[in-house]
Amino acid sequence: MEASAPQYKLILGSSSTARKKILGDMGYEFTTMSADIDEKAIRKEKPEDLVMALAEAKAEVIIPRVSIGESEGDAEPTLLITCDQVVVYEGAVREKPSSEAEARQFMKDYANGHAATVSSVLVTNLATGTRRGEWDKVEIYFHDLPDEVIDKLIEEGTVLYAAGGLIIEHPLVLPYIKEVVGSTDSVMGLPKGLTERLIKEVL
């Protein structure tokens, strides 16, 4: 017996490869749209407030670009998922590194220490306007990160596009992760359990 298709369309408002993979692994079919917003223009004291504000700003940019069903009688609502993530280290919010030097400093700081990721998920039902969002926090503890590993990571370049210069699932980084308190999918940018719950809440 075939599983019935969900009675809604899903748009992931993100161009993140990791988020696409997680949502795909959860069994969802979806399309993607990315929001180009000036993240630096949005400032909040608390990281939790910042990631929620950024997810909302992304939704606001994407929503006008989505055509909601050609006919009013379209039975399938469209759900939009927008997200954001920052890394918090010693109370300070870290976004994507602005340079190789900053990425290197970020990684040196984590060695034998810990950082946290704060991720937001916002799900908007475009048919009803119902919107639910929450944040999720994960603590990551590190062993020492050797300089040659940091060099390789910077040379490869992916870390320059990651919040806080942090990619825990990276094969070069994995051996130096001591402990992750929380879910790995949340660190990668999309907490599965939270996402599923918010989708149900807006339907």
Image (tube, rainbow, N blue to C red):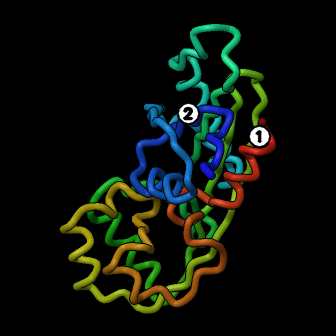
Residue 73 coordinates in the image, percent (x, y): 70, 11
Residue lying at the far front of the rendered structure: 1
Displayed quadrant of residue 190: bottom right
- Look at 50% across and 63% down and name the residue there: 188
Q: Nearer the viewer, residue 180 or 166?
A: 180
Q: Is residue 73 above or below residue 137?
A: above
- Look at 36% across and 87% down and name the residue there: 145
Q: Nearer the viewer, residue 203 or 89?
A: 203
Mark in front: 1 vs 2:
1
Q: Is residue 11 above or below residue 180?
A: above
Q: Secondary structure at mark 2?
A: helix
Q: Is residue 59 visible?
A: yes
Residue 194 coordinates in the image, percent (x, y): 71, 56
Q: Is residue 150 above or below residue 86?
A: below
Residue lying at the far top of the rendered structure: 71
Instruction: Name the residue that disc number 1 marks.
Output: 132
Displayed quadrant of residue 4: top right
Instruction: Name the residue that disc number 2 marks.
Output: 58
Q: CA distance from mark 1 to mark 2?
A: 14 Å
Q: Is residue 72 left or right of residue 13?
A: right
* Disc 1 packing (10 Å; few <14; some 14–19; many ≥20): some
Say which label, 1 or 2, has the lower sequence index. 2
For badge 1, the amino acid type reads: Arg
Q: Is residue 169 above or below residue 80?
A: below
For badge 2, the amino acid type reads: Lys
Q: Is residue 54 visible?
A: no
- Look at 36% across and 73% down and name the residue there: 170
Displayed quadrant of residue 175: bottom left
- Which of the numbered marks, if any, corresponds to residue 72? none
Q: Secondary structure at mark 1?
A: strand
Name the quadrant of the C terminus. top right
